Image: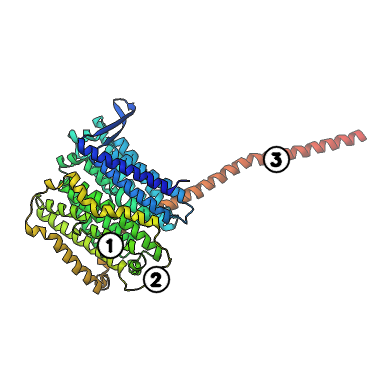
Amino acid sequence: MLNFKATAHLCTILATTFAYLFFEVIKNSKIMMIEWNMTKIMCLSLKFKLMLDLNSMIFTATVMIITSSVILYSTYYMSHSNKSNQFMKTIMIFILSMTTLIFSANLPSMMLGWEGLGMSSFILIMFYKSKKALTSSFLTMMINRVGDITLIMSALFFMNMNSWSFETFCNLSMSKEPIMLMMVALFSKSAQLPLSSWLTEAMAAPTPVSALVHSSTLVTAGIYIMIRFESTISNMKMTKVVMFIGMITIIMAGMNSITEWDIKKTIALSTLMQLSIIFFSISLNLFKLSMFHLILHATFKALIFLCASTFINTFNTQDMRKMSTAGHHMSSTQTAFNLANLSMCGFPFMSGAYSKELIMEAAHSTSYSMISSVMLLISLTCSIFYSIKMMFSVGSFTTMMQPVSKLKETKNQKNSIMMLLVPSIIMGNKLNWLMNIEHTIPAVSNIQKYHPMIALISSIMLISTMMKAQTGKHIKNTKEGLTLINYMMFSKNFSLQMKNKTLMMYMINLKSSESGTTEHLIKAIKNAAKLPSKKMHMMNASNMKTLIMVLIIMMMLVKF
């Protein structure tokens, strides 16, 4: 039986260790390589290669902090469950796979962590064993299989170079086909259009799983690997593709977040928008800022999920409009929830403000300054909108609905939230100083400095209009517009059709083949086996009758 508290303390120790190694890497500017030569196939060596550098150290430390907080929170969340041991083992497999992916320096080690993430996330989504959870996990697996197939195809292309190392990809010139296949895999893992509908479906998992898997680790794996391929993407001029995918995903996630009232799906859509902002930053060659925002986003988004988990358990609903008295019953959780949302919308002196403001300032100096400024302004407006919507919906006293369960905030619950609240407030300033980011940002005009304020005013006006219109009543009058908004630019509609038609057809065929054809085949084999035995039985019976008749005749002859 795995102990939740002991595992949480172990993850905290590991986070401290990797943070110390991060400082050592900064001080000495060194990179450590670990290589294990497993086997050799003709002239191609199969090696398990790990690289410990600046990005991997700080990212692993962040993942361990979030893992420690989530596991400590799970002592409260899984206290009445009889599957806590299974839950903990799956979480450990997931963390081991994520750590392998972070430190990977070649394709074999990356694919090992990649497949481990897919397998463990599939098990975690179907944890509740309900019909919805099973359907969501199956849909998630099918969409992620697209990325897995393209990743394997790109690995076959890379075999022609006689090397699977990341350094080889960055130094040698190659065709665009393997990189395009790799990017499709990265887009599917990070839920970018048109492969983004699985992220909201994955909210069927337990909420602590969403805090760990679907906010800071699994969905960020694609971005992290793309940052690893920094020079390759820049040299091959693949940034326009990344920019286009990021732009349409920003628009889609922004429209969906406006009309969504499910708190978990709203947070998932906010995650999707933040990931699209990072992809958009990568398209502007802002790789260092992308990594900076990736780390900060992981902390405050995991905190938002943990606070939402407490609200859902207390009110027994995921509708934000029915959680309006949460601040009265859970003051600590409500305060942490509001601070994390302020950090997400870029409130001054919070962690999120440092990365978002620097990204907006750096975007003004690029060749796509007009497009990038407009898109980042739209994304900032939408992020402020759904942050304020969540804070007002959960913290207001409009409906005065009483909680279903009279649960007090436990000590482990408060400690787990505090572990993420402190980084969500001060980590932006400290990490900005450690990574020495500001010296790469050019100076901008005073008008451009006011863009975040413009976004704040616009979002406040938008949310007040939506509140007066009673949550988009005028939008709902147009069926096509509602479908376009709520169905993620029809990508979810495609997933529903695939789920309801194609997959059901395959399941029916599988059922008929397993319980139909196979059953008839087994019956035919049994009948064929019975046929000789019946003949033998008939032959034996007739022989026995003949023998008895012969004996009777012989006895009669002897008597006479």
Q: What is the distance, in whole Å, between disc 2 and disc 3 at their CAs?
A: 77 Å
Kind of residue at badge 2: Gln
- Residue at the extreme left: 445
Residue density around tag 3, few if under 14, some if 14–19, many if 20 or more, within 10 Å: few
- Residue beneath label 1, please? 338
State the SS at label 1: helix
Residue in front for this viewpoint, 110 or 456: 456
Residue in front for this viewpoint, 124 or 185: 124
- Residue beneath label 3, please? 537
Kind of residue at badge 1: Asn
Q: Tell me, yes or no, if residue 464 can be seen here.
A: yes
Q: Do the residues labelled 1 and 3 touch (CB within 8 Å)?
A: no
Q: Earlier in the sequence, mark 2 or mark 3?
A: 2
Question: Which residue occupies 20% across, 51% down?
Answer: 429
Residue in front for this viewpoint, 554 or 429: 429
Q: Earlier in the sequence, mark 1 or mark 3?
A: 1
Residue 546: x %, y % from top left = 78, 37
